[in-house]
């Protein structure tokens, strides 16, 4: 998964990136009673998500805990008995954002309503520079070749899908298709949000994915031209190894879970590790998440992107999140104490 909320920030040219350089990380081993709200969480839900990906961890200490997790009758006791909370910091303040999986309305055949294609990778595309977005959309370069995976009712949604690289299509009979990134045409991404700012239509602080979408829909001719000024074009494949009813695949190639999976910087946080979240802002959050995804804009020891689920409602909630707080990684006891300063335990 590419991190859909982060991709929407790229649309606007406002991606949140980590520092160019960061201080050496520091490690502080905490007690569970120092985690705000720990006793009130649904530890059983977190344990189920942990079990989804822990078999894929390589470290033998993690694998031993994964085996122990199988038949736990008291999940909270499991975490408290075999883990220790470790606060990892690298000099940057904590930042939480949100991401989601888009859901588009589509058809398996072209109709008057559904006429904007999602294309599979052309067989002749093998890493070379290919046709631009404008050439594909205006000149119909790929027409009548049977490359369409689905037809969508909204060209703006197709554009955002290209930026995000993955999503789900819902057909009128209620069936679903999940699509994932297959290839791109080799042209560099051009931020349409930056174009609107340069034209004086919006100030930089006003630009968001929703603002861009609304402007394009209000100005269909100019809007189509604006989107085509981004020459980058993405081709897709049907993702059939995971049912569309489940969450999309994360960086560990397993389904991620709404409000229990986060994207992290694996330089600091092991993929598959439980992470305690203390998020501030308008929607405070205290819960145990599992680090199951990554993203190019997620850099730093105190940086996390929270997965909010699939569809427009999830997207609206995810888009509101840009909050401070604290994240604490639960480490196997022997790992945690290896980080502890000498004489502190």
Image (cartoon, rainbow, N blue to C red):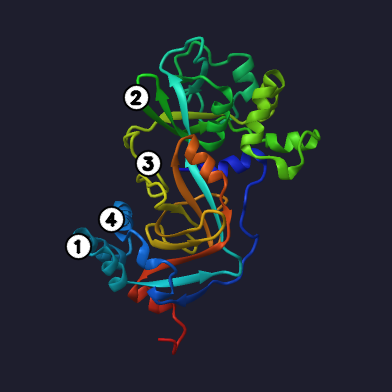
Circle 4/circle 1 CB separation < 8 Å: no
Distance between the alpha carbons at the discs numbered 3 and 4: 18 Å
Disc 3 on helix, strand or loop? Answer: loop
User: Which callout, 3 or 4, points at the residue further toward the start of the chain?
Assistant: 4
User: Which callout, 1 or 3, points at the residue further toward the start of the chain?
Assistant: 1
Of residue 229 and residue 285, the one placed in the foreground of this image is 285
Left or right relative to 340: residue 128: right
At which x and y percent is residue 173? 35, 19
Q: Which residue is mark 2?
A: 175
User: Which callout, 4 or 1, points at the residue further toward the start of the chain?
Assistant: 4
At which x and y percent is residue 221? 70, 18
Distance between the alpha carbons at the discs numbered 1 and 3: 26 Å
Q: Which mark is in front, 3 or 4?
A: 3
Q: Quadrant of the C terminus?
A: bottom left
Q: Which residue is mark 1?
A: 73
Circle 1/circle 3 CB separation < 8 Å: no
- Crowd around label 4: few <14 · some 14–19 · many ≥20 (10 Å): some
Distance between the alpha carbons at the discs numbered 2 and 1: 37 Å
* Badge number at residue 247: 3
Distance between the alpha carbons at the discs numbered 2 and 4: 31 Å
Q: Quadrant of the N terminus?
A: top left
- Residue at x-position 60% and y-position 29%: 129
Distance between the alpha carbons at the discs numbered 4 and 1: 19 Å
């Amino acid at each position: 998964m590419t991190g859909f909320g982060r991709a929407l920030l790229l649309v606007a040219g406002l991606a949140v990136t980590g520092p160019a350089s960061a201080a050496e990380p520091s490690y502080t081993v905490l007690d569970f009673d120092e985690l705000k709200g720990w006793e009130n969480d649904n530890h059983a839900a977190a344990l189920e998500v942990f079990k989804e990906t822990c078999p894929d961890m390589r470290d033998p200490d993690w694998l031993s805990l994964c085996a122990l997790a199988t038949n736990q009758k008291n999940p909270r006791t499991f975490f408290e008995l075999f883990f220790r909370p470790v606060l990892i910091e690298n000099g940057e303040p904590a930042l939480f954002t949100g991401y989601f999986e888009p859901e588009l309305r589509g058809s398996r055949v072209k109709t008057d309503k559904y006429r904007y294609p999602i294309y599979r990778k052309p067989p002749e595309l093998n890493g070379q520079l290919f046709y631009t977005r404008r050439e594909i959309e205006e000149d119909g370069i790929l027409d009548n070749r049977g490359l369409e995976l689905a037809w969508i009712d909204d060209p703006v949604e197709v554009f955002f899908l290209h930026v995000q690289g993955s999503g789900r299509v819902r057909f009128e009979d209620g069936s679903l298709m999940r699509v994932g990134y297959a290839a791109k045409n080799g042209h560099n991404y051009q931020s349409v949000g930056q174009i609107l700012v340069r034209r004086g239509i919006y100030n930089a602080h006003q630009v968001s994915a929703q603002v861009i979408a609304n402007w394009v829909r209000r100005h269909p001719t100019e809007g189509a031209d604006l989107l085509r000024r981004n020459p980058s074009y993405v081709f897709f494949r049907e993702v059939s190894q995971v049912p569309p009813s489940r969450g999309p695949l994360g960086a560990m190639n397993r389904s991620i879970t709404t409000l229990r999976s986060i994207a992290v910087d694996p330089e600091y946080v092991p993929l598959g590790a439980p992470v305690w979240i203390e998020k501030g802002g308008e929607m405070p959050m205290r819960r145990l998440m599992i680090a199951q995804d990554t993203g190019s804009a997620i850099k730093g020891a105190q940086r996390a992107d929270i997965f909010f689920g699939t569809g427009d409602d999830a997207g609206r909630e995810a888009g509101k999140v840009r909050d401070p707080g604290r994240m604490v990684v639960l480490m196997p006891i022997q790992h945690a104490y290896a980080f502890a300063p000498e004489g502190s335990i």
